[in-house]
Amino acid sequence: MTNLIAALIAISFYLICTLALLLRLRQHAPVLALGKTAALIPGFLALAAHIFTLEQGMVSVDGVNFGFYNALSLIAAFITLFTLISALRHPIEMLSILVMPIAALSIAVDMSAQSSHLLPPGSSGGLIFHVLTSLLAYSILALAALLAIALSIQNRFLHSHQPGGLIRFLPPLKTMESLLFETIVIGFIFLSISLISGLMFLENMFAQHLVHKTILSILAWCVFAVLLLGRWLLGWRGRTAIRWTLGGFISLMLAYFGSKFVLEIILRSS
């Protein structure tokens, strides 16, 4: 199986799964575990092909390429994995319908554009651990941001006394908030591990090309820490939780993709 064929298979199955879920919601089908699982199977098949595509495109004798577009596709795969697993447990197929076309687009972009940031062979285990925990933290907190956006839309419709439309396919507000904070807690743990491992294993985390990334990552950590304390001590929820979640994720997005875009795309092309 060539890399191009695997990429086309992944894109096709992502779109098939998206269509299957749309049809399922359109037909007002009851939420049966078997029916939902069957609708999500193409998504898992697409994810398997997506991972194969990433492995073929990222790993070589020169090392592992964590370039901008590869990293974008890898994070899209992680987000899709977490979304599909969550969709098996909760009625959040709407998020899968949003995430999978984005994952398909990330594959297409990765296949058509080139960027390079090699992690050379023989890199320390600590550095690899730091990179992986950073990617996991970003992916999980990106899913939290998507949940926050869905919760915001749901909250707005309910307050305007318009409970119909697509929001009727989402769980109740209380369930959505619980799922949001469960996701934030997991993402916060990985973000904490990532920052600690960066301080321990990177020779100079505050080197010139890492300083903005480091400061913004610490800022994101502080935002999520305050949010979790506010939830625990003051019972924060609703719009307050949504705003803090999106604020923390924006800081994290600028830390990771903002710095990578400037260093790998803008500066190298100039």
Image: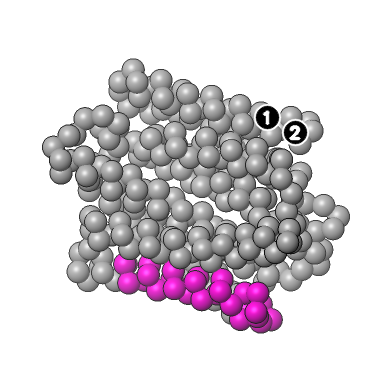
Using the rendered image of the protein, determine whether residue 201 is visible from the camera's viewpoint.
no
The residue located at (60%, 65%) in the rendering is: 259
In the rendered structure, which segment of residues is drawn in magenta? 202-228
* Residue with the mark numbered 2: 4
Q: Quadrant of residue 169?
A: top left
Asked whether disc 2 touches disc 1, contact meaning CB atoms under 8 Å apart, the reply is: yes
The residue located at (69%, 81%) in the rendering is: 203
Q: Is residue 100 in the magenta section?
A: no
The main secondary structure of the magenta stretch is: helix
Residue 3 screen position, x and y as percent:
76, 36
From this viewpoint, which residue is outermost toward the top? 27
The residue located at (44%, 61%) in the rendering is: 250
Q: Quadrant of residue 170?
A: top left
Quadrant location of the N terminus in the rendered image: top right
Using the rendered image of the protein, determine whether residue 196 is visible from the camera's viewpoint.
yes
Quadrant location of the C terminus in the rendered image: bottom right
Disc 2 is placed on an element classified as helix
From this viewpoint, which residue is outermost toward the front? 270
Q: CA distance from mark 2 to mark 1?
A: 6 Å
On screen, residue 30 above or below 71? above
Q: Residues within 10 Å of mark 2 (few under 14, many from 20)?
A: few
Residue 141 screen position, x and y as percent:
45, 57
Question: Amino acid under label 2?
Answer: Leu
Disc 1 is placed on an element classified as helix
Q: Is residue 211 in the magenta section?
A: yes
Residue 193 screen position, x and y as percent:
52, 70
**Camera-nearest residue between 239 and 228:** 239
* Residue with the mark numbered 1: 8
Question: Amino acid under label 1?
Answer: Leu
Horizontally, residue 253 falls left or right of residue 162, namely: right
Residue 100 screen position, x and y as percent:
51, 36
